[in-house]
Image (cartoon, rainbow, N blue to C red):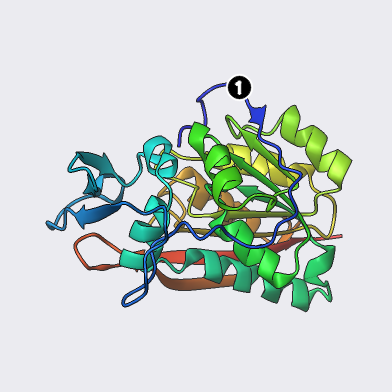
Amino acid sequence: MDVRSGARRPVASRTPYDGPRAAFAGGEGEPRGALIDYTVKLEDGPGRAQNEEAFTVTFEDGRTERLRLHDYERVYAIPGLYEEIVQNQLQCQSPAKLAAVLASVAELGGRSPQLLRVLDLGAGNGIVGEELRALGVEVLVGTDSAGTAGEATARDRPGLYTSYLVGDDTGEPELGTIVRELGLNCIVCAGALGFAHIEARSFMELWDLLPPGALFALTVHEDLAQPGASDIGDELQTLRCADSGTEIVVWERFRHRMSVAGAPIHYIAVGARKRD
């Protein structure tokens, strides 16, 4: 993902959401979905940075393709590939953790998930959105800078999002208009801050657009969450100040996923509420 990748365009779907299409690889011992016609081999040598992790896809016709895990344009274009690698093989917990944190923050404020109107920032192909739907969230807007992300969502989870915007994530004017028109009152962002993905400045501009009482939930690599380590680390430090106008109510270290070399990768889950 590159937040500077061009103009935003809508990917709309009016199809009522009735669950994901059966296009994904099953877990261990489970049958693979009908659209999965490949196998995946992780490059599991030690010492790779998280944004340099790679794998090889071998298709049913014998073709092979080497990709980095962060080659989102191509990864999302292949049905079920992201789920097979990140969710199944690398056991990613961020989508479920993010939904749990949001539920906790909402409960602390006496809010029902059905009343949340959520912007899913860096939405990918809708895995987080699916978790939010399971909570009872009804209004979901997705945005991602990977051009194939919206197409993958429409393909794999049609009707999941009220609206899905593809392009950069800089906030105005399109997202600002949608925030106002749909009355959005919550932002979620699973692992998309840092690693040259979404800039903290863009996240904070969107947060500023939301009304008093708004909520956010995000996950970020534990190293990047520290002040002085990254732009998001600095912004989170500012938000933790008593006079920031934002109350951080959840700050929890958890295992985001395994690396391709089999080592745990830890993130920080953050939940917050904008003071009235």
Which residue appears farthest toward the left when viewing the image? 45
The reply, left or right, for residue 226 in relation to residue 8 is: left
Is 13 drawn above or below residue 128 in the view shown?
above
Q: Nearer the viewer, residue 81 or 100?
A: 81
Residue at image position (41%, 52%) is 35
The picture places residue 65, in percent across and down from the top left corner, at: 22, 39
The reply, left or right, for residue 204 in relation to residue 215 is: left
**Count of numbered badges drawn on the protein:** 1
Crowd class of label 1 (few under 14; some 14 to 19; many from 20; radius 10 Å): few
The reply, left or right, for residue 257 in relation to residue 211 is: left
Q: Nearer the viewer, residue 183 or 232?
A: 183
Residue at image position (35%, 39%) is 71
**Helix, strand or loop status at disc 1:** loop
Is 82 drawn above or below residue 116 in the view shown?
above
Residue at image position (63%, 57%) is 129
Residue 271 visible at all: no
Q: Quadrant of residue 206?
A: top right
Q: Quadrant of the N terminus?
A: top left
The picture places residue 53, in percent across and down from the top left corner, at: 25, 49
Is 245 drawn above or below residue 173 in the view shown?
below
Q: Which residue is mark 1?
A: 7
Q: Nearer the viewer, residue 149 or 200?
A: 149
Q: Quadrant of the C terminus?
A: bottom right
Q: Nearer the viewer, residue 73 or 171?
A: 73
Residue at image position (46%, 32%) is 2
Residue 44 visible at all: yes
The picture places residue 221, in percent across and down from the top left corner, at: 41, 58
The reply, left or right, for residue 231 in relation to residue 72 is: right
The picture places residue 106, in percent across and down from the top left corner, at: 75, 71
Q: Amino acid at mark 1?
A: Ala
Which residue appears farthest toward the top when viewing the image? 6
